[in-house]
Image (cartoon, helix red, strand yellow):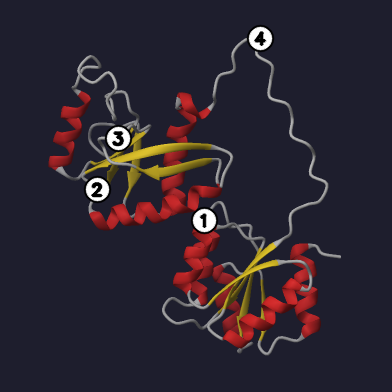
Amino acid sequence: MSDGKTFAVAMIGIPEQERNVLKNIFKLSLYRAYTYTLVSVEEPSQILIVDADDSNAMAEWSALTNKSAAQSPAGATSSRTPTVMVSKDPPANGAAHYLRRPFIATRVFGVLDQVAAQAPSAAPERVIGEEPAPASAPVTEPPAPTALVVDDSSTIRKQIELELKLRGVQVNAVESGEQAFEALAQSQYDLIFLDVVLPGIDGYQICKTIKKDKARKKTPVIMLTSKSSPFDRVKGALAGCDTYLTKPVKQSAFQKTVRKYLKLS
């Protein structure tokens, strides 16, 4: 988990479907400088998200912001809670923070990070005269590199996993795009092997999603394909993949690729 700050986010009027999208996006923040977690509006929160397209939500938000501090001194969401307005178009009330529909991870993090950077809890204050915390002991050995393997063939997964483990790489192997997104929400990887043909969402779409995420766009993605036509390579390049390996993968090509992107000796 991130060593950064965690911000509780409450929502007013956000539909259930969009709320679930935001919850999944928040999962990707676990390894960022600012981490976001969803709470109810009755709980303490540092950021409030309001549906500006919903008149009932706006009325609820207006009533909330009109409460005096004396009425809710220990209230969950106070009138001073920074608010992000959600709308298809910029809200007419000139909100300081505005999030446009539809929700995209980079767009959501861009707005929330602006709010978080201005929040008092983003930079804890140190008491004058207090000794700074001692620096932690230097790590003698770097952590083992990690890789995610996404392929619906159990044989391919096992072969790649074995080859990587022989090189000291920790491996998480999954068989579908849905499982890949779950793994990405829980961990950060140094290298991703991604099959083009998968049940459900294909490898190109998964690659595009990874490369659009600010926290993961620099993670090398190696596409695995049984085809090697120029058209397939163009599609891979447009999706943002770093290189291709054609199945069946030759050991020499595999070793060269791993050494290049993990910088192994």
Instruction: Name the secondary structure under disc 3.
Output: loop
Q: Earlier in the sequence, mark 4 or mark 3?
A: 3
Number of numbered callouts drawn: 4
Report the Cα–Cα distance between label 1 and label 2.
23 Å
For image coordinates 25% across by 17% down, the residue present is 69
Amino acid of disc 4: Gly
User: Relative to 202, is 97 above or below?
Assistant: above
Q: Residues within 10 Å of mark 2 (few under 14, many from 20)?
A: some
CB-based contact (under 8 Å), mark 4 and mark 2: no
Q: Earlier in the sequence, mark 2 or mark 3?
A: 2
Marks 3/1: CA distance?
29 Å
Q: Position of residue 111 (x, y in %)?
A: 42, 40
Residue 103 showing in the rendered view? no
Label 1 amino acid? Asp
> What residue sits right under mark 1 in the picture?
213
Whether the residues at callouts 1 and 2 have beta carbons within 8 Å, the answer is: no
* Residue picked out by circle 3: 43
What whole-number distance in Å separates the C-alpha atoms at marks 4 and 2? 46 Å
Label 4, residues with CA under 10 Å away: few <14, some 14-19, many ≥20: few
In x, y percent, where is residue 124? 54, 24
Residue at 41% x, 47% y: name it: 108
User: Separation of disc 4 and disc 3 at Cα?
Assistant: 35 Å
Q: Earlier in the sequence, mark 1 or mark 4?
A: 4
